[in-house]
Image (cartoon, grey):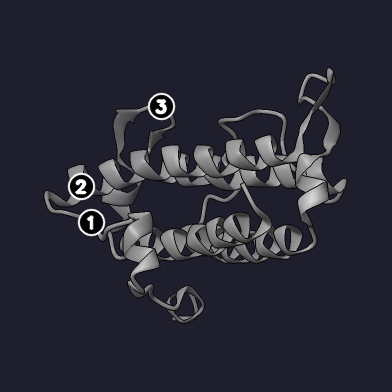
Amino acid sequence: MSVDQFKQFAAYNKWANARLYAAALDLPELSYRLHIGVFFGGLHGTLNHLLLTDRLWLKRLTGEGDHPNRLDAILYEDRMELAHARIAEDERLITVIEKYDEAALRGLHSYRTTSGMPQSHVLGDILLHLFNHQTHHRGQAHACLSILTGGEPPSLDLLVFQRGGTAPDLEKLTSR
């Protein structure tokens, strides 16, 4: 994969998260918090997990930032605070990706797992994992929205993004 493709994935990530969060913020509080049997309980747990793992990988990639060592930790109980943190993390991810070049993507990157084990992987493979993980759990969150609303949530499809599908301004939605 090329740097341009990873830049596209970072932009898509921000776009899809904005669409997902807009739908989540529109839910009544009880529905948003409802445990519906998915791996992280429900929508709130899944959105927290996505933020947590982005922070974990960005810490591994940059050496900066904090993250808990439990993958089911709730970083933010308040969904507006969670949305603000998501906005910041999406911007941070875009900034990190913009710094890479083709040579960096082919190089090995060393880090430690949450248990402290040293690891080394090709940077491009790490980034593929990061974006694949995001897509996987956004799909779960999308399913949560479908269950909770009884309808079809906004599409998170990459092709819709590539065709110029719009995303709400999450900054404006969270400033209400």
User: Does residue 41 lie above or below 162 as drawn?
Assistant: above
Name the residue rendered at 84%, 35% in the picture: 109
For mark 2, give the secondary structure. Answer: helix
Q: Amino acid at mark 3?
A: Phe
Name the residue rendered at 67%, 56% in the picture: 3
Disc 2 or 1, which lies upstream in sequence? 2
The disc placed on residue 39 is: 3
Name the residue rendered at 28%, 42% in the picture: 144
Labels 2 & 1 near each other (Cβ < 8 A): yes
Whole-angstrom CA distance, mark 3 to mark 1, is 20 Å
Disc 3 or 2, which lies upstream in sequence? 3
Report whether 29 appears left or right of 111: left
User: Does residue 16 lie above or below 150 as drawn?
Assistant: below
User: Does residue 115 lie above or below 22 as drawn?
Assistant: above
Report whether 87 appears left or right of 31: right
Among all residues in the image, which is located at the extreme left? 150
For mark 3, give the secondary structure. Answer: loop
Quarter that holds the C terminus: bottom left
Whole-angstrom CA distance, mark 2 to mark 1, is 6 Å
User: Quarter-wise, where is residue 112 in the image?
Assistant: top right
Q: Position of residue 54 (x, y in %)?
A: 64, 46
For mark 1, give the secondary structure. Answer: loop
**Mark 1 neighbour class, 10 Å CA radius: few under 14, some 14 to 19, many 20 or more:** some
The disc placed on residue 146 is: 2
Q: Amino acid at mark 1?
A: Pro
Report the front residue among 42 and 100: 100
Report the front residue among 176 and 48: 48
Report whether 151 appears left or right of 143: left
Q: Amino acid at mark 2?
A: Ser
Q: Which residue is mark 1?
A: 153
Q: Position of residue 27 (x, y in %)?
A: 28, 59
